Amino acid sequence: MSSQRTMHNLALIGFMGTGKSSVGRLVASHIHFQFIDTDEWIENHTGKSITDIFAQAGEAVFRQIEKQVVGEISHLNKHVFSTGGGLAANAENLQSLKSHALVVCLWASPEVIWERVRAQSHRPLLKDPDPQEKIRRLLASREPFYKQADVLVNTEMRSVKEVAQHVLHQFQLARTSHDGSAT
Ligand code: S3P
């Protein structure tokens, strides 16, 4: 990490089902930062659910809206962001997040992800004849992006609280080791 980095925010990236929103909320309340979930932001600003955006406008439009969110949040300070699973699988989005935030990737294997998401139905990308294979394929294609995070945290065998403590510790470490960032 270069000493030029500013880290007045914390961004959680990673695949669906890795706990970004729950962990982000917990971390934000602990350090008294504002919390933004990018999917919630999109739903509030468009007045539509993510499912409806995918169904009515398509994934390409959703990715464009994600880019807008990335631009908007780059001006904020003292925020924790939880990002949709595909948001950081884009070089420009990732670069933008890194310009103002410590980027932490929450990780889990395809098998564990499947166990966590199989009972849920709100994710359009998993409405697939073979969702397990879709998870494996998507995760493999996104892995090169996720691995560019500043910190990778394995969420397997850890509770939300334990993951949040780990993330907090990494954030505090990063901010104290970067001049001018611990504001
Ligand atoms: C997506 C993940 C979802 C949501 C959308 C697309 C993805 O967010 O942004 O359904 O491309 O992986 P979560 O990671 O919060 O489930």
Image: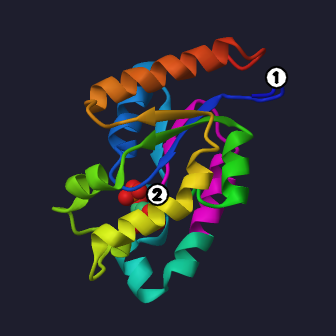
Residue at 38% across, 56% down: 16
Measure the alpha-carbon separation of dots 2 and 1: 28 Å
**Residue reaching furthest to the left:** 119
Residue in the foreground of this view, choosing between 73 and 86: 86
Determine if the C-beta at disc 1 is less than 8 A from ligand 1.
no
163 vs 136: above or below: above
Read off the magenta span.
65-86
Q: Disc 2 or 1, which lies upstream in sequence?
A: 1
Amino acid tagged 1: Ser
Q: Residue 84: x, y in percent?
A: 47, 57
What residue did someone put label 1 on? 3
136 vs 100: above or below: below
Residue 105 magenta-drawn? no
Quadrant in the picture for the N terminus? top right
Provide the secondary structure element on which disc 2 rests: loop
Ligand 1 appears in which quadrant?
bottom left
Quadrant in the picture for the C terminus? top right
Provide the secondary structure element on which disc 1 rests: loop
Residue 85: assigned label? 2
**Dot 2, how many residues are within 10 Å of its Cα: few (below 14), some (14-19), or many (20+)?**
many
Amino acid tagged 2: Gly
Residue in the foreground of this view, choosing between 29 and 17: 17
Determine if the C-beta at disc 2 is less than 8 A from ligand 1.
yes
